[in-house]
Amino acid sequence: MNNNPIGIFDSGVGGLSVARSIRRKLPDEDLIYIADSFYAPYGDKSKEFIFLRSSYIFDYLISRNVKAIVVACNTVTVSVIDNLRYKYSIPIIGVEPGIKPAVAVSKSGIVGVLATEQTVNSISFRNLINRFTDHARIETQSCPGLVELVETQKIEGQEIRFMLEKYVTPMLDKGADTIVMGCTHFAFLTKILREIIGSELKIINTHQAVAAETSRRLNVNNLLTLGTQGGDEEFLSSNVHKNTSLLFEKLWGEQVAVSSFT
Ligand code: DGL
């Protein structure tokens, strides 16, 4: 048993979708969330850059005695999680686009994946897709601009709707009946995507699966907290400005304080 916090990080606020599910699944755990928003998006950065930033954040979280780190970012997971696992011995939980559950529910056998450029072009994402190409056709689409809109709280309205529509329409035209949100920021666009694609098609997010995996990993490593009073959350961002708390509050769902991460 271990009462230390769980560290969670993302290139920005997208990982709050994962953190929210972890909070629901593990109500008594303390959480430290880091949004590296100053450097978001990671999706157009090099693998080397992503590894350097991730290592910097890992070092900080480990200095805060976290017992496990959740990489709440598809881009980091598919590009450098193996390197991070090699470098650090702490339990690391990652997030990958949910192709497996999408293939399982798709009736047309055509699955669309919306993700960042770095994710779409990564070798491990290609490998993930190749595991399912016997069972389905996977159409991928990189979505520059979407992460930036979520980071600036534009998760509703015409601008994001048009952009999302532009990215998803070619997949629908090709017959996709299941759309995978391959970036944790996009979880916050589920409602607007639903409005665009209608109620028949399926949308796959992975945050609940990541929360379940986090719980499982803590359990098998005997790291679950003994606390029963409800855990605390601490939020940090590398880009704190006058609207940061509002943005976090909107995505987290209640009032929070956000400290600066340097
Ligand atoms: N939330 C991150 C992900 O899941 C966004 C990555 C980025 O900043 O490009 O991929």
Image (cartoon, rainbow, N blue to C red):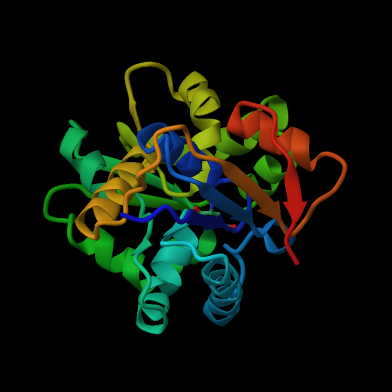
Relative vertical location of residue 116 with respect to residue 257 in this rendering, above or below: below
Q: Position of residue 65 (x, y in %)?
A: 51, 66
Identity of the residue drawn at 70% across and 56% down: 37
Quadrant location, ligand no. 1: bottom right
Relative vertical location of residue 238 with respect to residue 13 in this rendering, above or below: below
Residue 205: quadrant of the picture:
top left
The answer to whether one can see residue 143 in this image is: no
Q: Which quadrant of the figure contains the C terminus?
A: bottom right
Relative vertical location of residue 166 with respect to residue 1 in this rendering, above or below: above
Residue 126: quadrant of the picture:
bottom left
Q: Which quadrant of the figure contains the N terminus?
A: bottom left
Drawn side of residue 47 relative to residue 261, left or right: left
Q: Position of residue 118 (x, y in %)?
A: 51, 66
Q: Nearer the viewer, residue 212 or 198?
A: 212
Identity of the residue drawn at 40% across and 40% down: 227
Q: Nearer the viewer, residue 73 or 202?
A: 73
Drawn side of residue 145 relative to residue 191, left or right: right
